[in-house]
Amino acid sequence: MAKQAKLWPSEWTVPLVLSLLVHVAVVGLMVFGMHFKPTPNKPMQVQLQNDAPEQPDNQEIVQAVTVDQAAVEKRVNEIREQKRQADLAEQRRQAELERKAEAARKAREAEQQRLRELQAEQEAERRRIAKEKAEAERQKAAAEKAAAEAEARRKREEEAAAKAEAERKRKEEEARKAEEERKRREQEARERAERERQLQEELRAEEAARAKARSQQMQSEVQRYTALITQTIQRNWITDDSMRGKECVLTISVAPSGFVKSVNQGEGDASVCQSARNAVLKANTLPVSQDPEVYKLMETIELTVAPKQ
């Protein structure tokens, strides 16, 4: 150590030693100071002689550091021993607590087992009593049920007989009413058919009468308007004596307003047809019925015309 210390620079020696001692003390206190309070230790003293103008010998400083470090290690070992003893005491205390806890647990389990057995005995007794009571009630209920069923069966038989008799009478009454209803409906059907036949005959007769009256009316209208058309043509027809006794059949088509839509060349005497055709075209409009059905009959009309005698 002395030889190696001489290799250190003299100005580094004291600061390095102090730093080492401080770190060792701090580590020891951090490790063991949480559980134990160490006995007071005399502070380590390092004497530095500044009176002499020269620096102290490096070997002496190293020896002082070595002695102080041994004291620190001794103190650390003492603290470790104290911690070990304390740990052993704590382990014994924990073991005793666990033993007592285990004993208490076993006693508690034994008491719980005893209570369970007692409860099981009480439950078995309760079930036995309940079973006997239920059996007695079942037998009583069975007897009451049998009596009730016998009474109900007797009533059902009486009711069934009464119901069968009532049903027989009801069916006889229904059959009688059904027969009466059938006869009534047949009579009503015959009467209804007769009324419908008579009504149809009346309707057909009335319809025929209306049709006949309508036909007569329409024929009358046709004749009337045919005469009017003939008169209109006569008023516009220019004739001469050579046409006397001659005639012409014209086919005339008129609009609903009476406007002459067309007129053919006519069939008959040529001069009569030509002059009659000119008279129709000159009239331009002929009398026409406002009745649509009459107009339909006269929309195209064949008209025989002859000069007046």
Image (cartoon, helix red, strand yellow):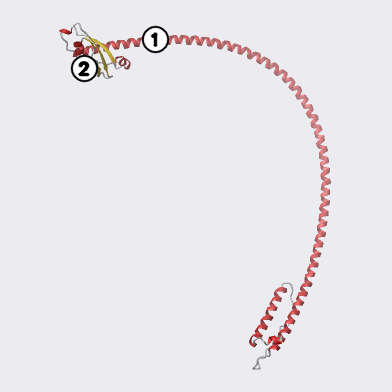
Q: Quadrant of residue 155?
A: top right
Question: How many marks overall?
Answer: 2
Q: Residues within 10 Å of mark 2 (few under 14, many from 20)?
A: some
Q: Position of residue 112 (x, y in %)?
A: 81, 52
Camera-side mark, 2 or 1: 2
What residue is shown at x 76% (from left), y 77% (from top)?
77
Left/right placement of residue 273 relative to residue 78 reads left
Relative height, residue 91 to residue 28 (above, below) = above
Relative height, residue 25 to residue 110 (above, below) = below
Q: Which residue occupies the foreground of this view, 140 or 258?
A: 258
Mark 2 or mark 1: name the one nearer the start of the chain: 1
What residue is shown at x 74% (from left), y 82% (from top)?
70
State the residue position of label 2. Answer: 281
**Residue 208 numbered tag:** 1
What residue is shown at x 56% (from left), y 11% (from top)?
184
**Residue 288 numbered tag:** none
Q: Quadrant of residue 303?
A: top left
Q: Position of residue 52 (x, y in %)?
A: 66, 94
**Element type at mark 1:** helix
Q: Quadrant of residue 224?
A: top left
Q: Residues within 10 Å of mark 1 (few under 14, many from 20)?
A: few
Quadrant placement of the C terminus: top left
Q: Which residue occupies the foreground of this view, 291 or 149?
A: 291
What amino acid type is highlighted by mark number 2? Answer: Leu
What amino acid type is highlighted by mark number 1? Answer: Ala
Left/right placement of residue 279 relative to residue 290 reads left
Q: Position of residue 33 (x, y in %)?
A: 72, 74
**Element type at mark 2:** helix
